[in-house]
Image: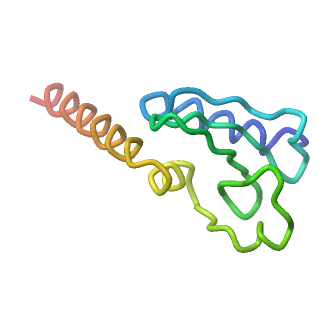
C-alpha cells in the first residue's frame, strides 16, 4: 500500500507518451498519502503533478497547505494535462482519431 499513489501516477504517465516529452517520478517526495512527478510538456515547460486521494493536481514545489487546498483537482491525468497544455489536447485528439481509424479498418 505504501507505493499505491506512486505506482498509479507512474502507470498513468507511462500511458501519455503521445502528449508529453518526458516525466520523472520524484521518489524522494512520494509518501503513503501522495505521489509527485515532474512532467515535461510539449510547450517546452515543466509542471509538477501531485496524485493523492483528492485526485490529480498541478503542484508547486514550494506551495503551502492553504494554496494547495485552493488548486484545481482533476479526476484524471488526461484532464489535468488537457487543461494545462493545448498541444497535449491536440495530440490526444490525433491519437484518438488514429485509434478509431484502426478500429474502423479492422471492422470492415
Q: Quadrant of residue 108?
A: top left
Looking at the picture, the colour scheme in use is: rainbow
Residue situated in front as seen by the camera: 94 or 38? 38
Q: Is residue 66 above or below residue 1?
A: below
Residue 103 in picture, x, y percent from top left: 22, 32
Q: Determine the residue located farthest toward the left in the rendered image.
A: 108
Looking at the image, residue 81 lies above or below residue 10: below
> Does residue 87 appear left or right of residue 40 in this picture?
left
Task: Give the residue drawn at x 90%, y 45%.
Answer: 31
Residue 71 image offset from top left, x and y in percent:
67, 68
- Residue at screen point 21% across, 28% down: 102
Q: Position of residue 4 (x, y in %)?
A: 80, 43
Measuring 85% from the left and 33% from the top, which residue is drawn there? Answer: 27
* Residue drawn at point x = 63 percent, y = 30 percent: 23
Residue 105 vs residue 69: left or right? left
Q: Quadrant of residue 30?
A: top right
The residue nearer to you, when weighing 97 against 68, is 68
Q: Quadrant of the N terminus?
A: top right
Image quadrant of residue 80? Answer: bottom right
Is 52 above or below relative to 70?
above
- Tag count: 0
Amino acid at each position: 500500500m505504501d507505493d499505491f499513489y506512486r505506482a498509479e501516477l507512474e502507470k498513468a504517465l507511462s500511458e501519455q507518451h503521445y502528449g508529453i516529452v518526458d516525466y520523472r517520478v520524484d521518489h524522494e517526495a512520494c509518501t503513503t498519502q501522495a505521489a509527485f512527478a515532474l512532467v515535461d510538456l510539449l510547450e517546452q515547460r515543466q509542471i509538477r503533478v501531485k496524485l493523492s486521494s483528492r485526485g490529480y493536481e498541478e503542484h508547486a514545489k514550494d506551495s503551502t497547505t492553504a494554496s494547495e487546498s485552493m488548486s484545481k483537482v482533476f479526476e484524471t491525468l488526461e484532464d489535468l494535462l488537457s487543461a494545462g497544455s493545448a498541444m497535449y489536447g491536440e495530440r490526444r485528439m490525433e491519437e484518438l482519431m488514429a485509434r478509431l481509424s484502426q478500429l474502423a479498418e479492422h471492422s470492415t
